[in-house]
Amino acid sequence: MKFLLKYFFLIFYCGIQLGTAQEKEKDHLMLARSDYSFKETASRLAKTLEQHNTFTFFSKIEHSKEAKKAGLELSENLLLIFGDPKQGSLLMQKDQLAGLELPLKILVYKQDNQTIITYSSTNYLKQRYDLRKNKDLGNLSKTLKSIVSKTAGNRVKSSGKLKLKKHQGIISEISEFNFNATYNRLVTAIKENPDLQIFIELDHFKNAEEINIGLRPTKLIIFGSPKIGTPIMKENSKIALELPIKFLVWRDEAGVVKISYNDPLFLAKRFKLTKNLPQLSAMKNALEELSENVAKY
């Protein structure tokens, strides 16, 4: 009898541990299946983020609507962009390149009549930007899990493993111009390209300054082309977390101005894409050409 009691106690205890399992080092995506419709899930999530006492809701990108504007079809797909300016600024103090991942993003999409919520794990940030000693990311992990699980009505689980080195998959172009000139040249170059559109511009430096946190000049541009991005998202909806494309313009501790962005072929590896490799390779070449033309006299 005592043996049976110990056995059931062990099973019960393990169940609790599994139910509250922490993100593991190689987990790079977190996912929850929603008990609600796509529209209701998106509404519940947006409302929760807007009402959260530390998060600022910045914007949303409706990938499916952008695809329709381009004459293409994409199942329901919505990216919500939000963050904690204080926490984000402190992370960028430790590694400015983390500005590529900030603000935070949560994706809601529909697949096989199922609504799914996904986001990048905090361990992804820890690995890619060597932030393993940052205790605040542990609290952020719990907060995101709580928000997503309550929104979905289901438990949040890890989805996909990825071992990362510091700054893996990030390409940087050194600019021959000062920070403001580089940023303005980049914005102009994107606006002058009829195939591209700017969705969001974020001034990390200004956001940090408003809460009295020191940060070197750092700005983010989120831009892209639905005609190019839609077929890629149709192969794997989760890559919509990283689309549209982002350019980070920043000045480092040595005063060097850089334009940094994610290597599209790294994204292919992260999201296990195989069908659209030629398009992603062409995207990489286009980003290299654009950043180089902006950065050089």
Image (spheres, rainbow, N blue to C red):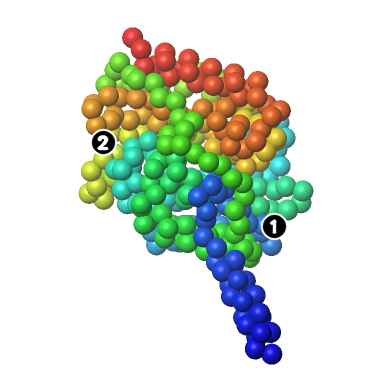
Instruction: List the residue tagged with mark 2.
Output: 216
> Residue 237 sits in which quadrant?
top right
Q: Is residue 291 left or right of residue 80?
A: left
**Does the rendering let one see residue 81?**
no
State which tag comes first along the sequence, 1 or 2.
1
The one nearer the camera, 137 or 45, is 137
Give the x, y percent position of residue 294. Answer: 39, 16
The one nearer the camera, 144 or 39, is 144
Give the x, y percent position of residue 240. Answer: 59, 39
User: Label 1 to label 2, Cα distance in Å?
Assistant: 43 Å
Give the x, y percent position of residue 195. Answer: 57, 21
Which of the two discs, 1 and 2, sits closer to the camera?
A: 2
Q: Residue at x 23, y 26 (%)?
A: 255
> Residue 267 sits in which quadrant?
top right
> Helix or strand or loop: what does disc 1 sit on?
loop
Give the x, y percent position of residue 80. Answer: 53, 47
149 up-or-down from 65: above or below: below
Instruction: Count every numbered label the image shows and give the total.
Output: 2
Q: Residue at x 41, y 54 (%)?
A: 137
Q: Can you say which quadrant of the picture contains the N terminus?
A: bottom right
17 up-or-down from 38: above or below: below
Q: Identity of the amino acid at label 2?
A: Arg
**Mark sitting on residue 37:** 1
**Mark sitting on residue 70:** none
Q: Identity of the amino acid at label 1?
A: Ser
